[in-house]
Image (cartoon, rainbow, N blue to C red):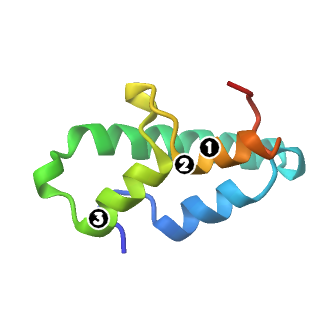
Amino acid sequence: MSDTGRQSLGDKAGSALKPDSQKSTTEHAGDWMKGKSDSAASTMQPQSEKSTTQKVGDSISGNQNQDQEGLMDKAKNTLGLGGSQK
């Protein structure tokens, strides 16, 4: 379960597992907006106030505001499923 105001872990996983090449422009835009919003909420919420589940979710997804690549992004890029290779 995600903290209030945060993207659910199921939504993050579902979005991450679908290859970018199979997403519509609308899906890309939605993912981008949700990602930016969730990343901002992650940055603003102190670690001490995050649930254990949210801490795990943040470590998996990374924090775009702090230019941290998450484990899901690393896996997608390794498999060639990500939109940008780092």
Q: Is residue 31 left or right of residue 56?
A: right
Residue at horizontal 83 percent and vertical 41 percent from the top:
80
Q: Residues within 10 Å of mark 2 (few under 14, many from 20)?
A: some
Q: Which residue position is annotated with label 1?
A: 73
Cα separation, mark 2 vs mark 1, equals: 5 Å
Labels 2 and 1 touching (C-beta < 8 A): yes
Q: Measuring from the top left, give residue 74's x and y in whole percent.
A: 62, 42
What's under tag 3, amino acid-wise? Asp
Mark 1 and mark 3 lie on one chain; the one further toward the N terminus is 3
Q: Is residue 82 left or right of residue 72?
A: right
Q: Measuring from the top left, give residue 83's x and y in whole percent.
A: 76, 35
- The mark found on residue 71 in the picture is 2
Dot 3 falls on a residue whose secondary structure is loop
Q: Is residue 29 left or right of residue 37?
A: right
Q: Nearer the viewer, mark 1 or mark 3?
A: 1
What's under tag 2, amino acid-wise? Leu
Q: Which residue position is annotated with label 3?
A: 3
User: In which quadrant will I find the N terminus?
Assistant: bottom left
